[in-house]
């Protein structure tokens, strides 16, 4: 007889990060940072994923991205007792934004620099995503042998000008979206070096599926260009 217990929700995570070839005297470093971190929240597992893209034309955009992801998101306690995941994450991100200006007060290059941030917390079959900047968040719903793809995030751009981010005294106006997973659905947090549009992302996932083969093919395509940006992604697929 059925036990009545719901089956545990499980996710597969794949990651990629690669340094760009930018030319023009740009700093020779990967200015992206990424994270996938399994945590406990109210007795259940929560998955925290993020990408940050250091703004190239500033003194230390990569340093700001690493500060945000590696110094804080990777190890800080995020959820308070009894807090719901999404409000807790938003409160936490705002606190780190304030802390940045205190901790880096004696580092003018950091204070003059910025990064984007796209971050999500996944509990059970629901993802709560936040972003500031132009690092895209894609969602691909399984539809038979193909996927229906959409971009959940709307970039903080005015023309080609980035108008919000983390650092450099930007407004840091967090945007938020919620999405529910069915088995086979895929969430991707990426920096803008990965794909220029949701149509480009849809091409990759339809041709290769949400697999390491897709990531390898993307990397080969990117490296075939004369110049290219840093490219990073965290891809989360619900497998049960």
Image: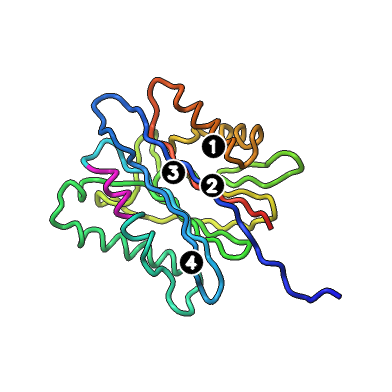
Against 79, residue 71 (above or below) is above
User: For numbered disc 3, what is the local secondary structure?
Assistant: loop
Tell which circle, 3 or 4, labels the residue nearer the N-terminal end: 4
Tell which circle, 1 or 2, labels the residue nearer the N-terminal end: 2
User: For numbered disc 2, what is the local secondary structure?
Assistant: strand
Q: How far apart are marks 2 and 4 (CA)?
A: 17 Å
CB under 8 Å between discs 3 and 4: no
Q: Quadrant of residue 238?
A: bottom right
Which numbered disc covers residue 39? 4
Task: Give the residues drawn in magenta, as a range.
Answer: 60-68
Image point (33%, 46%), residue name:
115
Which numbered disc covers residue 44? none
Which numbered disc covers residue 135? 3
Task: Please state if 107 lies on the left or on the right of 151 as rendered.
Answer: left
Residue assigned mark 2: 14
Q: Distance between the residues labelled 4 and 1?
A: 26 Å
Task: Farthest residue to the top: give it.
Answer: 226
Tell which circle, 2 or 4, labels the residue nearer the N-terminal end: 2
Q: How far apart are marks 2 and 3 (CA)?
A: 17 Å
Which numbered disc covers residue 215? 1
CB under 8 Å between discs 2 and 3: no
């Amino acid at each position: 007889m059925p036990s009545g217990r719901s089956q545990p929700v499980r996710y597969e995570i794949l990651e990629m990060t690669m340094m760009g070839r930018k030319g023009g005297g740009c700093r020779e470093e990967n200015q992206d940072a990424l994270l996938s971190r399994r945590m406990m929240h109210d007795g259940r597992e929560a998955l925290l994923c993020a990408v940050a893209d250091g703004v190239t034309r500033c003194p230390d955009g990569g340093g700001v991205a690493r500060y945000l992801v590696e110094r804080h998101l990777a190890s800080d306690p995020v959820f308070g007792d009894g807090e719901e995941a999404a409000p807790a994450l938003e409160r936490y991100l705002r606190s780190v934004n304030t802390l940045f200006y205190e901790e880096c007060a004696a580092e003018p290059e950091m204070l003059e620099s910025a990064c984007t941030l796209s971050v999500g917390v996944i509990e059970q079959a629901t993802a709560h995503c936040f972003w500031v900047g132009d690092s895209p968040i894609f969602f691909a719903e399984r539809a038979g042998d193909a996927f229906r793809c959409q971009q959940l995030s709307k970039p903080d751009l005015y023309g080609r000008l980035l108008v919000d981010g983390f650092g450099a005294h930007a407004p840091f106006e967090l945007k938020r979206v919620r999405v529910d997973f069915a088995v086979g659905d895929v969430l991707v947090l990426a920096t803008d070096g990965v794909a220029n549009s949701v149509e480009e992302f849809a091409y990759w996932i339809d041709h290769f599926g949400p697999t390491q083969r897709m990531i390898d093919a993307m990397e080969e395509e990117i490296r075939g260009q004369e110049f290219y940006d840093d490219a990073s992604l965290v891809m989360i697929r619900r497998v049960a």
